Image (cartoon, grey):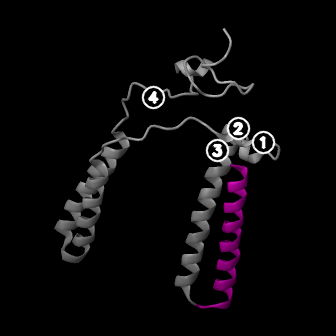
Amino acid sequence: MRTEARLFTGVAVFFAVTAVGYGWFSEEPAGTAVLAIAFLMAALVAFFLHVQYRRRGPRAQDRGDAQVVETAGPLEFLPPHSPWPITTAVGSVVVALGVVYGLWLLLLGLGVLAHGVFGMVFQYAGRADRAGPGRPGHPDRAGQGSNSPLRDGRSASTRSR
């Protein structure tokens, strides 16, 4: 994530320089505020990516001698059927209508929207198979019973016993 952190650091520096220059040469505070907020948002993303790089170490994408195979990781779980995206969309529409028609509708929409967002976040929070392939505690961690390639290029199902 070092490359991404550097990219967003460059974007943040650009917005900072632009905000200072715009604020110096113009007398409009709105444009300066927008550029300052853009700087803060880019700096926040750059900070997050830098912290993740320091915490997790270099990835294969950060090394020049890495192979494409090294970037492959376990596939994450994606829910097949979920009512929460539709609930969130309906909540967003009701919030937008509440901005037009009144506070009571806006508050109702915020409730539906919050319900949908929390539903998506916590839908599979108590899932029993949280340890996926490649994670500690999963049977495929040792290479047993999977078709993933081993370090020597053979698959686990075809290796010699």
Residue beneath the point at 36% across and 35% down: 124
Could you tell me the amino acid type at mark 3? Gln
Numbered range of the magenta stretch: 1-27
- Provide residue 158's location: percent of width, then percent of height: 63, 19
- Say which mark, if any, is on residue 52: 3
Q: Quadrant of the C terminus?
A: top right
Does residue 62 appear to the left or right of 129 in the view shown?
Answer: right
**Disc number lying in front (4 or 3):** 4
Seen in the picture, residue 26 relative to 134 is either above or below; the reply is below
Q: Residue furthest right?
A: 65
Question: Viewed as shown, does residue 121 lie left or right of 35?
Answer: left
Please tell me which residue is depicted at 37% across the width and 41% down the height of the picture: 79
Mark-to-mark CA distance, 4 and 3: 21 Å
Q: Give the number of the mark in front: 3 or 1.
A: 1
- For the residues marked 1 and 4, what is the alpha-carbon distance in whole angstroms? 29 Å
Pointer 2 local density, CA inside 10 Å: few below 14, some 14–19, many at least 20: few
Mark 1 surroundings: few (<14), some (14-19) or many (≥20) residues within 10 A: few
Considering the numbered disc 2 on the image, is that residue within a helix, a strand or a loop?
Answer: helix
- Which comes before the other along the chain, label 1 or label 4? 1
- Residue at which label 4 appears: 130
The magenta stretch spans residue 33:
no
Picture disc at residue 66 = 1
